[in-house]
């Protein structure tokens, strides 16, 4: 009976050790999965922070693009007219044209040609030319903002793709870790069942 007791003790000890190993493997899998989840959360946090940081530039770029489209008529004649009229009535344009017209009049007065046809022609041409030049300048400035917004949006898209790839990898690692722990636990249970059968066979042989 002592021999049987020793055999049973060995088998039971093996079952107990195997179960402990299975639990350890499952715990290790959960730990690895938790680490992957922490990585996923950090990836998302960093991407959200980037989106928030770049949002003003993207928004400014969108507004600037709309301004460009309005100036060249891509949003319709009414929008184009409103854009040009708004620019023409702005304090900036009014100040520049007033200064320019005063300079023309002062020059004409100094040369004795205040009432001459050349002076009147210069005054008639000055305002439209100034408006055209400033509209082109404004379009270029808006283009700079549009390009900045486009670059910011492209940077967000690139970072989003990178984050998505990293998160996909971490999810795969997380799944593998959990599955690995579960498989290890299942193998232990199967081994324990086999060991229990071995105990029965051993007892039956005596």
Image (tube, rainbow, N blue to C red):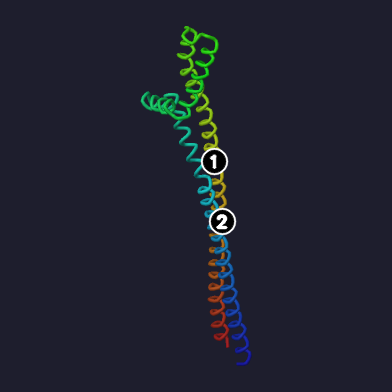
Query: Which residue corresponds to mark 1?
Result: 152
| x then y, percent, for residue 1 | 60, 92
Observer-nearest of 23 and 189: 23
Query: Which residue corresponds to mark 2?
Result: 170
Q: Is residue 25 above or below residue 121?
A: below
Q: Nearer the viewer, mark 2 or mark 1?
A: 1
How crowded pointer 1 is (Cα within 10 Å; few <14, some 14-19, many 20+) is rated as many
SS label for mark 2: helix
| x then y, percent, for residue 17 | 60, 78
**Residue at image location 54% in from the left, 45% down from the top:** 161
Observer-nearest of 191 and 40: 40
Residue at mark 2 to residue at mark 1: CA–CA distance: 26 Å
Residue at the top extreme, as displayed: 117
Residue at the bottom extreme, as displayed: 1
Q: Is residue 79 left or right of residue 9?
A: left
> Quadrant where the C terminus lies?
bottom right
Residue at the left extreme, as displayed: 78
Q: Is residue 68 left or right of residue 34?
A: left
């Amino acid at each position: 009976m002592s021999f049987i007791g020793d055999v049973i003790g060995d088998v039971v000890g093996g079952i107990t050790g195997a179960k402990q190993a299975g639990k350890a493997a499952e715990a290790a899998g959960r730990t690895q999965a938790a680490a992957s989840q922490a990585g996923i959360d950090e990836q998302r946090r960093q991407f959200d922070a980037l989106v928030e940081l770049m949002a003003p530039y993207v928004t400014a770029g969108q507004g600037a693009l709309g301004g460009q489209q309005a100036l060249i008529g891509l949003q319709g004649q009414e929008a184009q007219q409103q854009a040009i009229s708004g620019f023409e009535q702005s304090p900036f344009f009014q100040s520049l044209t007033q200064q320019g017209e005063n300079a023309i009049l002062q020059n004409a007065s100094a040369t004795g040609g205040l009432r001459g046809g050349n002076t009147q022609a210069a005054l008639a041409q000055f305002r439209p030319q100034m408006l055209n030049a400033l509209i082109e300048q404004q379009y270029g400035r808006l283009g700079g903002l549009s390009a900045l917004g486009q670059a910011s949006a492209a940077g967000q898209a690139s970072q989003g793709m990178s984050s998505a790839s990293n998160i996909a990898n971490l999810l795969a690692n997380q799944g593998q870790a959990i599955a690995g722990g579960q498989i290890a636990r299942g193998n232990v249970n199967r081994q324990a069942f086999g060991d229990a059968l071995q105990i029965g066979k051993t007892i039956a042989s005596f």
